Image: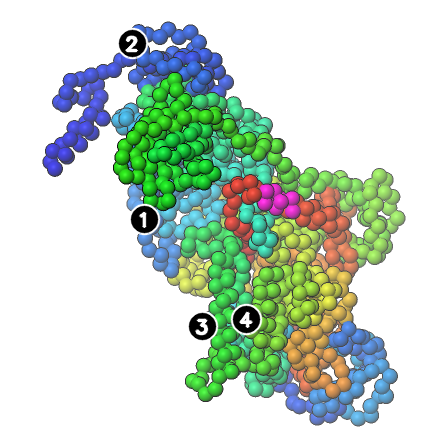
Amino acid sequence: MKLLALTFLLGGAFLMAQDYFPKNDGVKTKNNNYMAFTNAKIYVSPTQIIQNGTLLIQDGKVVQVGKSVTIPKNAIVEDLQGKFIYPSFIDVFSDYGMAKPENADGSGRSSQYNPNRDGFYWNDHIMPENSAIGSFTYDKKKAEELRKAGFGVVNSHIQDGIARGTGVLVALNDSGSEAQRILSDKSAQYFSFEKSITSRQSYPTSIMGATALMRQLYYDLDWYNKGNIKTTDRSLEALEENKSLNQIFAAGGNGNILRADKIGDLFGIQYTILAGGDEYERIADVKATNARLIVPLNFPDAYDVSNPYEAQYVALKDMRHWNLAPTNPKVLEDNGVQFSFTLHELKSPSDLKSKLMKAITYGLSKTKALEALTTVPASILGKSAEIGSLQPGSQANFLITSGDIFDEATSLYENWVQGNKNIIQSKDQKDVRGEYTLATNGQNYTVSITGDANKPKVELKKGTEKVPSKLEYTTDWLNVSFSENGTESYRFAGKIISGSDDISGKMILPNGTETTATLTKTDPFKETAKTSDDKKPQLMAVTYPNVSYGYKTKPQQESILFKNATVWTGNSILENTDVLVKNGKIAKVGKDLRAGGATTVDATGKHLTAGIIDEHSHIAALSINEAGHNSSAEVRMKDAIDPKDMDIYRNLAGGVTTIQLLHGSANPIGGRSAILRLKWGENADGLVFPGSPKFIKFALGENVKQSNWGSYSRFPQTRMGVEQVYTDYFQRAKEYDAKKKSGLPVRHDEEMEVLAEILNSERFISCHSYVQSEINMMMKVAEKFGFQMNTFTHILEGYKVADKMAEHGVGGSTFSDWWAYKFEVNDAIPYNAAIMASQGVTVAINSDDAEMSRRLNQEAGKTVKYGGMSELEAWKTVTLNPAKLLHLDDRVGSVEEGKDADLVLWSDHPLSVYAKAEKTLIEGAVYFDLEKDKTIRQSVQQERNQLINMMLNEKEKGGKTQTPVQNKKERFECETL
Amino acid sequence: MKQIITIICLVFGVLLQAQQTPAAPQTEQVAIFGATAHIGNGEVIENCTIIFNDGKITAIGADLMAPTIGTMINAQGKHVYPGFIAPSKSLGLVEVDAVRASNDQDELGEMIPNIRSIVAYNAESKVVESMRPNGILLAQVTPKGGRISGTSTIVQFDAWNWEDAAVKWDDGIHLNWPSLFRKGSSWLGEPNAFLPNKNYQEQVDEVLTFVQNAKAYGAGISQELNLPFAAMQGLFNGSQRLFIHANGEKEIMDAVTSAQKAGIPHMVVVGGYRAHKITDFLKQHNIPVLVSEPHALPQFDDDDYDFPYKLPKLLVEAGLLVGLQNESMSNFQTRNLPFYAGHVAGQGLDKEKALQLITGNTAKILGIDGDYGTLEVGKSATLFISEGDALDMRTNQLTKAFIDGRDISLETHQTELWKRYMGKYESEGK
């Protein structure tokens, strides 16, 4: 036993042997011989190709490559006539050899707000000090899998956390030592938007929180670097140290590339970005980032739509993505985006080839494909001189193949890593496929060997009767076994001899007798013609956004004359009136206007109003609450906009043109709002109302106390504590602002910056509120700190303190008739709007609900029923009043000359339950049209049908399928965590 | 005006926080005249006189002689409707959604037809009270949750206690049919999406086994009492209806065929999101649908934006017996029932037909059409007068409402707070 251990020790020492290491188990040897590979087609790089070239290597490196290479005498020469040599592949986004991060223990009911660590950054999800080399173990089994897929080098990192630390660059060289294999132990610095699973620290809970945390991290680094923090922060130290490396951001799809790039822009960092595979949807935006991308080949499998009841659950957007995702690499290439490929998000490295071939079928050039696997990843890692090509001096990492590496029939024979040969398939193995006869034991059999040349299959027949049989074929030995009547086993072992197509060997009969036998070749192998798959795949059109009801072309401004409408201006209802829209503005309101080239719309019997403005909305967002802290002023809803949300279109169909996308009500100080125009088809930035004033969400009551979900560890738990949160934060902001204004250096604190804007009346508050005590309290806090509350939203007991609200000058944005859903709305009454209005409060009716928002006109109508508001005043609660509350009433909210042409044409009285929006315009462009909607519905059904047929086809052809799923968007309201 | 409000406040001030006192039984004849009467069966009678006595309608028509006795109500320019009926709601079983202590709608257990809603019905619920000023005067009080949630009872909304409230005891049993798709469980590491329910058939079999056992139990003699099985017997003898809560095509067809096979004569589909795809099937089996409220988002991205708006219309046009319910919404929302019907009318369904969705049709579906749902001689005088079109929020302004001929209060906790605070401001000269 001891001896065995000693052997291991010695063996280990041998593997690690270096020139300067002492050697005690033999003599010191060194192999200075060369290897020369001749007559091959050599891809020195994807664009430098040598026909009939020679590759000369020594000591793990390329010495020379070219057509006329002088081969030294001490070279072993291998003739690769007809074969190809490629540089082996590199994956820059791997978790190869990494210990799997472990889930944090425990799952208490209450959230954890403090970090687990000490001496590091305040947030556990920031771990730039993590270094992949520290948790790296060379994994031979996985290395073999990767080499089989063509990889020679991978850059691996701990795929966990927001700041993830550095990577390790490893050559997949089984026979080398760690000293040879590790090409770099600090190869790049990695980031993501995803929290670590190793800590339960709550913050951040949202995409906007993660974005804000990244920004604050860089601000804090700057402050730290200037020596303002007296203690040591090992995270910040590491972040600074890693600055010189390439910075890689694991962003993914759904607009995250832009989110990551914006963080970089703010701090002068150009990230290399892990993409999501959906870049084709908005390629111009992706290109504009100038970022190099790491692109997964995560093309989805077709949905199994053979059961029609299940098929209806699959959304068009998901089917379309199946259809278009394989075009993603081509689209990136066509647009000049530089990208590398990664195995990330593939189930197995062995899927790589089929995915690559698919991308090529869909138009990706083979050169780009090869670049994305070799030169680009090498360049991303700053290692172009060492890996990714076969220039002299490069590592001898290369592949030997039977032909073009992207052809289906091509075999990968060898994958050389650092000059060490790894055989994937024998390149010398003879193709034994064909038809044979076999005579033994007085019987005659026919034997046909088919299938893959390297892994052939056998079929053995006696006459026409099939006999169960098996075949094994390894390095020149062919074994065939078969059994007659289930019990009589025959075993044959033959050796392949060059110069003869017949295979002779030993046959062991059922009774154990050994004889000789020969497989006599009668016919050569005939490849059965494959069904032609080369047909160009049929591709669906990308729409804006790329979901059903997206537009093929973005709506454009038009000149329109609405004739003879009932027009609702800010202060009157005008019968038989015309409205002329030009250049995105309301050009004229009056009688008998001339079209002057404008398209005339007969609006007789119809009503024309301003577009509806929803003061309180949570549509078009990927996340609503940053619930990780009791104040999250640093987060911006702008960072969470989802331009693909179908509810945008549905809101337009209900006449809504502008919304305030509010943060939720999880904490007293929420996040900054985004005011959006519902320009369906624009990207996230294009939805933001240009020049809109700054807003933030505050919240009071049960939600911020966490009353309804058993969480007991976060301050505040009472309305008394809520007041203290505000007093504390505003006092600190006041001090921060004063210090900053005095010229003294301050740690740039996004949260304090935002709160100081409130104190300086540069940012307005929309405050979620219910009961009168808290409403009153909030006004008193504001008055104490010298600013004005702008809007109380929900404000269901506003009617109890309407006079105080009017005196303070705050508006109320309320539900028409909601109540009874929680304790604090016991006294909520539908007369609230009317009562507040009677006391001079500017009153809006809002939705906080994706369903209600698309019929806010009806909700406004309820103020006529409850409390008897006049129809004109009722209509203002969803147009001019919310415009006033958002300080946008100079732009939108009423039909007046000079205002933006945000208009709705209604089929009926707009406050009536019978009214339908027929046209919805934003800045003079028609974003919803009832007639157009009818044709879109038809095309949605047609396209669904087309794609379903294509998927059925795919299944019939034997393509992979996945179970139908319905990717339902999560809908948000204030309380959604 | 200011004085009036002050007086109202003085009078009602003492009653604040208490519920409205149920009205006394009708003692003298009431005649409403000059009204536009919406009968609830598709008809309208202009300039109509409606006479009721002892809680029953005794005469209705345009050419009636004016009575000489009793109360006369001039309803010229106004509209009269049968009281609206809200099916499949847990009204009176929950007071405040987020307060668990006030929630009595969902009992433990999967197959619990023996659970009866009526015994927990809070006749003094403030939420119930708030229905009345909008014209909703009756509801099917329904337990929620589980596979078979329990037994519902139909109540009227002006009662001292649940015995007073009940108008049709234990009218039906509610079965939540399994779904073909289910939400992925993050606990099991599944995606945040809806996936095929692999246990669908197994869950269906569980229901069928239960139903078969209940039937066998009923056929047997002298055995130990089994409360759940015993509670199912009304389904087999036709005295109770089976309310099948289901939305998919396959689910509905599976449910209907297996319930019929099990020998249940009366059933109703509740939900029916895809019912428009199988209208022939539903007609053939004579199955009515209590379709979900139009104020809902489409369940599928690719659906027409207005699909929930127009679904009730599609079902009516296909010739089915259709009513409206909003079982998936908070109880307080049920006061919007008339506006759901109005919204469907906005999609092009005749307004009187839209009205049937919350009156005559619903009464038929629930089996209370002998007494409620339409304004016809011999039926209960459960009706109201509105200033205008009660299906439109602007004009749904009730001036009078009667339940079984009793002149009920239209005040609520909410109107009292309104008057109280308006009174405060007015008294302060604001």
- Badge 1: residue crowd in 10 Å (few <14, some 14–19, many ≥20): some
Q: Mark 1 or mark 4, which is nearer to you?
A: 4
Q: Residues within 10 Å of mark 2 (few under 14, many from 20)?
A: few
The crowding category of the residue bearing disc 3, from other C-alpha atoms within 10 Å (few below 14, some 14 to 19, many at least 20), is few
Quadrant of image for the N terminus of chain A: top left
Few, some or many C-alpha atoms within 10 Å of disc 4 (few <14, some 14-19, many ≥20)?
many
CA distance separating discs 4 and 2: 86 Å
Q: In this view, does A667 lie to the left or right of A917?
A: left
Write down the region rendered in magenta: A945-953
Residue A753 in percent (x, y) is at 48, 44
| Rendered position, A703 above or below A673 | below
Is residue A834 placed above or below A729 in the rendered structure?
A: below
Same-subunit check for callouts 3 and 2: no
Q: Mark 4 points at which residue?
A: B175
- Label 3 vs label 1, nearer the camera: 3
Amino acid carrying mark 2 in the image: Asn
Above or below, A122 relative to B151: above
Q: Are marks 4 and 3 in contact (CB under 8 Å)?
A: no
Q: Is residue A685 toward the left or the right of residue A630 in the image?
A: right
Residue nearer the viewer, A95 or B55: A95
Q: Mark 2 lies on which chain?
A: A
Residue ID for mark 2: A74
Q: Residue A116 carries which label?
A: 1
Frontmost of labels 2 and 1 is: 2
Q: Distance between the residues labelled 1 and 4?
A: 49 Å
State the residue in front, B255 or A103: B255
User: What residue is at 79 percent from the left and 86 percent from the top?
Assistant: B59
Q: In the depicted view, which residue is nearer to us: A287 or B13?
A: A287
